[in-house]
Image (tube, rainbow, N blue to C red):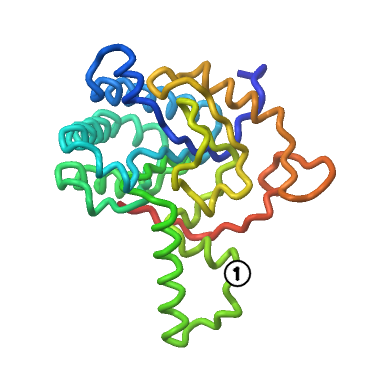
Amino acid sequence: MTDLPPAPKSVAIIMDGNGRWAEARGLPRVEGHAEGAQSVKEIVTRCRERGVKSLTLYSFSTENWRRPAAEVSALMKLLQRYVFEERETILKNGIQLRVIGQPDRLPVFVRKPLRLLVKDSADNRDMTLCLALSYGGRQELVEAMRQLGREVRAGRLDPERIDEAMISAHLQTRGMPDPDLLIRTSGEIRVSNFLLWQIAYSELYVTDTAWPDFRVPQLEAAFAAYGGRERRFGRTGVQTRSDDADPTPTASTPTPGA
C-alpha cells in the first residue's frame, strides 16, 4: 500500500442507494440492504488497513422509522446479524464500537448485543467505528443546547463562556475528530441531517455508485480525490491536510455508549 496516497484520518459515510439498487434488479428492497451490509464489512476492514482512525456510518436515521414496518424490521434483523457476525473481528482487530443517535428506540434484540459489544470494545484504540442509529443531526444539536441551557439555569455556566469547544463537548461525538472526508453514495447531493456541526469543514465526495456496489476500489477513488484537495478551513494560501490544520476544536473525553 506504499504507492497509495495517505488516507484521511476521519471518514464519515452516508450509505445511500440500497433500495434503488435492489429495485433496479427487480429484487425486494431488503436484498439491497443485505448486499449493503457486505459493503459495510469490506469498507470497515479496508479503512482499518489504511490507517483511518475514525469511521462513522449513517446506518439508520430518525426519518427511517417512517419506512414500511416490514422494511424496518428487516433492517433491524440485519443490524443484529452484523453485530453477532462481526463481534470477533471487531474485538480482535482493535476496533472500538460506538453508537450515536437514539439507540433506546431500537428493539431489545438489537439493543442488548449492541450495548454489550460497545462495552467489550471500549478499550480498543486502533480504530473507532461509530454507527449512527436512529440519528438526526438537528436532534443532536437540540439536545446539546438543552444540556447547556440546564447548566446555565442552574448557575453552573456563564453563557459568555460557551464556545465551539464546549458545544462539541456536549455532542454525542465528543472525543471523536470531526470528519476529514464525508462520502455520499448513490448520487444525491445533500447531507440529510447527518453530523451537521461536525462536517463544517469536511471535504465532500459524492459518487453515483449505490452503496451495495461501493467496495475497496470505490473507497480508494474517494481517498484519491481527497488527496488532491487543498483544505484551507476558510483561510487563504496553501494549507496542508494535517489534523493540526483543522481549527475546529474537539473535546478530549470519549464516552462510548449505546
Q: Can residue 48 be seen from the camera position used here?
A: no
- Considering only vertical position in the picture, is 152 above or below 51? below
Q: Residue furthest bottom?
A: 155
Q: Which residue is mark 1?
A: 163
Local crowd size for mark 1, using a 10 Å CA cut-off: few (<14), some (14–19), many (≥20): few
Between 172 and 3, which is closer to the camera in this rendering?
172
Image point 71% across, 48% down: which residue? 233
Residue in the image at 26% along x and 48% along y = 115
| Residue 217 seen in the current view | yes
State whether residue 126 is above or below residue 21.
below
Left or right of 238? Residue 157 is: left
Q: Residue at x 63, y 47 (%)?
A: 201
How many numbered marks have been drawn onto this rendered protein structure?
Answer: 1
| In the depicted structure, whether residue 77 falls above or below residue 103 | above
> Height in image: 246 above or below 252?
above
Looking at the image, residue 183 sits to the left or right of residue 131; the answer is right
Seen from this angle, which residue lies furthest right? 237
Q: Looking at the picture, which amino acid does disc 1 mark?
A: Asp
Q: Position of residue 157 (x, y in %)?
A: 51, 81
Q: Position of residue 126 (x, y in %)?
A: 48, 38
Q: For this view, does 113 lie left or right of residue 138?
A: left
Q: Residue at x 25, y 44 (%)?
A: 65
Asked where in the image residue 78 lies, by quadrant, the reply is top left
On the image, which quarter does residue 83 sit in? top left
Give the image quarter of residue 160: bottom right
* Element at label 1: loop
- Residue 248 at what x, y percent from top left? 63, 55
